[in-house]
Image (tube, rainbow, N blue to C red):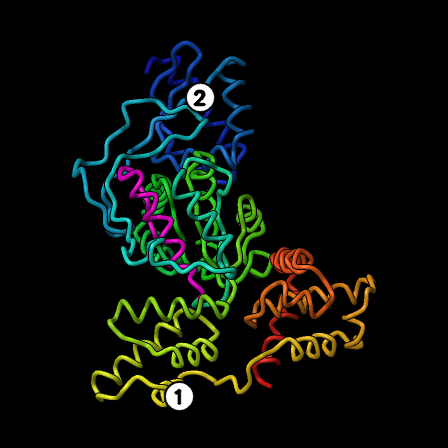
């Protein structure tokens, strides 16, 4: 560095110091090192790519003002920073190069952001959770179709990020991992990582304690497809949220796919940073509903076949009618039936099914039918039951009528035509009503709560 260059850089540092609190200057500007100034291009060294992003996000105006004042209006700022290699204490296990961290031999421009490192990682994907083993029905068809589209073409940004939500046990983890497996099958070199929010939080805590936050963030910014499961576990953890915010921004800006699952939709995530919630809604938000009767039977049949267990039709019928909460419960029932059949040498019949279910779930005493649904919906909204069967287009009656169609389709085995005939409507009208309710439920928390209350009341009758 020449004397003039030294004086210019000292002048910059002095202006930074004069315009910032001492702790901010020490944390974010003292570590910047002068490397060269040639042809109006100032090249500086920073500890990591995250460090660079943080400077640009929080101090861009100060940087621009200071550098133009010292070097002139044509100055351009370039960065060099460290490539992060293996750091098992703060990341999931990685394999690959064992070289020591080194200064990148290319100066990186401020924008666009560039990937940090070329490393192999363990994707943490369970091969059992693939699309072939994923049962598809009305409760998850939209989410599955979108997931398959992402797996075929992860570079397409139409559904980025993908936010999948629904109650526990409805297949969120299976779908998210199936997308990751599909991406790896079509492009083995693509860096795909599945991680639970709790593990991410543990890694962040360990990295923070060791002073390795920059390396931690740099590792995650090098992922091509990042899958975060149960992201609602970030609620109430501001440090983790801020860190994930920077990771999210980097990946999205570089057209890297993000997939998140949650037990609740973004609008119901209290104590989550608003700027993060707004980003969750940038792409596609899909809800997974509790499995309907048809898909419950399919899950039972597949699970029994995988375990080498034959389930008589009456047992399939009984279990599918009474185990309604989740796929997880259905699979657990099959495991219990198999254990009783093999260990206790009992036949798999309706008596055994009743005995197993008595200890596992609350049995639905009655089969829900159209008349029960119409009565329950009209009572819930304080509407005369006969009004549902009229041609009235009043908003409250029309909404209740659509809800009856939706719940009858969900809770009974009636066809769309059969449902329509009971209300003097066509097949197409019923299909429109079902679609309309599904679309509204994706955005209206009150309607989702109403549907849950009505369904619970029906099951408990």
Q: Is residue 191 magenta?
A: yes
Question: Of the residues tagged 1 and 2, which is closer to the observer?
Answer: 1
Boundaries of the magenta span: 170-194
Q: Residue 239 versus residue 298: which sits nearer the camera?
A: 298
Q: Secondary structure at mark 2?
A: strand
Which picture quadrant has residue 433?
bottom right
Q: Is residue 350 above or below residue 33?
A: below
Task: Determine the CA span between mark 1 and mark 2.
Answer: 72 Å
Residue behind mark 1: 354
Q: Residue 125 versus residue 430: which sits nearer the camera?
A: 430
Residue 385 rendering spot, x and y as whole percentages? 77, 77
Which picture quadrant has residue 51?
top left
Which residue lies most toward the top here? 39
Q: Is residue 289 above or below residue 284?
A: below
Is there CB contact under 8 Å for labels 1 and 2?
Answer: no
Picture residue at 37% right of the left edge, 86% below the top: 350
Residue behind mark 2: 77
Residue 420 rendering spot, x and y as whole percentages? 68, 65
- Quadrant in the picture for the C terminus: bottom right
* Residue neighbourhood size for the residue with mark 2, other residues' Cα within 10 Å, grouped as few (<14), some (14–19), many (≥20): some
Residue 188 rendering spot, x and y as whole percentages? 27, 40
Prevalent SS, magenta region: helix
Asked whether residue 431 appears in the rendered view, the answer is yes
Q: Is residue 375 above or below residue 346?
A: above
Q: Secondary structure at mark 1?
A: helix
- Quadrant in the picture for the N terminus: top left
Disc marking residue 384: none
Left or right, 84 with reference to 65: left
* Residue neighbourhood size for the residue with mark 1, other residues' Cα within 10 Å, grouped as few (<14), some (14–19), many (≥20): some
Residue 256 rendering spot, x and y as whole percentages? 41, 38
């Amino acid at each position: 560095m020449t004397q003039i260059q030294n004086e210019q850089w000292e002048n910059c540092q002095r202006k930074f110091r004069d315009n910032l609190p001492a702790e901010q200057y020490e944390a974010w500007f003292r570590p910047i090192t002068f490397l060269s100034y040639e042809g109006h291009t100032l090249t500086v060294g920073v500890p990591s790519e995250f460090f660079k992003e943080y400077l640009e996000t929080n101090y861009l105006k100060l940087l621009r003002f200071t550098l133009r004042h010292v070097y002139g209006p044509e100055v351009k700022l370039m960065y060099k920073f460290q490539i992060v290699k293996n750091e098992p204490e703060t990341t999931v296990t990685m394999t690959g190069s064992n070289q020591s961290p080194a200064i990148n031999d290319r100066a990186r421009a401020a924008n666009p952001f560039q990937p940090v490192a070329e490393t192999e990682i363990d994707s943490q994907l369970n091969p059992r959770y693939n699309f072939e083993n994923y049962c598809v029905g009305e409760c998850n068809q939209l989410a599955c179709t979108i997931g398959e589209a992402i797996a075929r073409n992860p570079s397409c940004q139409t559904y980025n990020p993908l936010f999948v939500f629904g109650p526990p046990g409805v297949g969120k983890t299976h779908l998210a991992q199936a997308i990751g497996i599909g991406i790896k099958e079509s492009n083995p070199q693509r860096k795909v990582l599945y991680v639970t929010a709790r593990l991410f939080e543990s890694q962040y805590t360990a990295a923070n304690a060791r002073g390795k936050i920059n390396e931690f963030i740099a590792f995650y910014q090098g992922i091509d497809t990042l899958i975060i499961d149960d992201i609602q576990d970030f609620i109430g953890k501001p440090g983790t949220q801020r860190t994930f915010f920077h990771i999210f921004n980097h990946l999205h800006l570089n057209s890297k796919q993000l997939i998140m699952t949650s037990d609740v939709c973004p609008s119901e995530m209290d104590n989550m940073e608003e700027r993060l919630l707004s980003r969750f809604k940038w792409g596609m938000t899909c809800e997974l509903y509790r499995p309907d009767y048809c898909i419950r039977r399919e899950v039972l049949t597949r699970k029994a076949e995988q375990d080498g267990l034959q389930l008589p039709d009456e047992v399939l019928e009984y279990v599918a009618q009474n185990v309604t909460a989740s796929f997880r419960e259905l699979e657990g029932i099959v495991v219990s039936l198999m254990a009783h059949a093999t260990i206790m040498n009992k036949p798999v019949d309706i008596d055994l099914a009743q005995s197993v279910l008595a200890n596992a779930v609350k049995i639905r005493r009655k089969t829900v039918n159209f008349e029960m649904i119409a009565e329950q919906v009209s009572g819930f909204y304080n509407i005369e039951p006969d009004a549902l069967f009229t041609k009235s287009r009043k908003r409250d009656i029309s909404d209740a009528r659509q809800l009856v169609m939706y719940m009858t389709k969900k809770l009974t085995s009636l066809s769309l035509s059969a449902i329509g005939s009971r209300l003097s409507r066509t097949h197409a009208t019923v299909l429109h009503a079902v679609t309309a309710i599904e679309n509204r439920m994706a955005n209206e928390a009150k309607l989702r709560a109403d549907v849950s209350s009505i369904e619970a009341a029906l099951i408990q009758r």
